[in-house]
């Protein structure tokens, strides 16, 4: 018997924990980046969410390692 697995959801908003997983970094690092202003976020009530486009912009802003 096989089990069907659902395709991953292409999220528009990420919780900080989900953003950390997507970037393969620690959750505390995400909070530090948000506090420094390096990673934009929005507040919905008492929660913080990070737009997918802001995650992509942060990754694009990272300097590549020299060869």
Image (tube, rainbow, N blue to C red):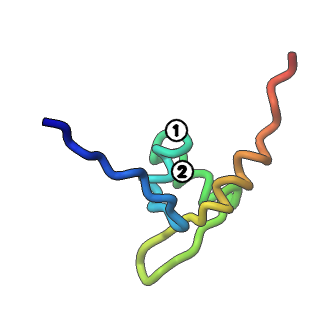
Give the camera-side residue of 13 and 45. Answer: 13
Q: Which mark is residue 33?
A: none
**Which residue is farthest top?**
67
Callout 1–callout 2 Cβ contact below 8 Å: yes
Image point (57%, 51%), residue name: 32
Question: What residue sits right under mark 1 in the picture?
Answer: 25
Which quadrant of the figure has residue 40?
Answer: bottom right
Disc on res. 30: 2
Q: Residue at x 51, y 68 (%)?
A: 49
Q: How many marks?
A: 2
Residue at 19 percent of width and 37 percent of height: 2
Report which quarter residue 34 is drawn in: bottom right
> Which one is in front, 5 or 43?
5
Please state if 3 lies on the left or on the right of 31 as rendered: left
User: In the current view of this chain or complex, which residue is farthest to the front?
Assistant: 1
x and y percentages locating residue 25 in the rendered image: 52, 38
For the residue pair 31 and 42, the one nearer the viewer reads as: 42
- Position of 1 with respect to 25 (left or right) is left
Query: Looking at the picture, how far across and down is residue 47, in whole percent?
Result: 43, 73
Describe residue 33's horizontal placement relative to residue 57 as left or right: left
């Amino acid at each position: 018997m096989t089990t069907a697995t659902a395709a991953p959801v292409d999220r528009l908003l990420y919780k900080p924990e989900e953003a950390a997983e997507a970037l393969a970094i620690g959750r505390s690092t995400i909070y530090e980046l948000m506090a420094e202003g390096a990673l934009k976020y929005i507040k919905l009530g008492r929660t913080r969410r990070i737009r997918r486009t802001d995650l992509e912009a942060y990754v694009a802003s990272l300097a590549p390692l020299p060869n």
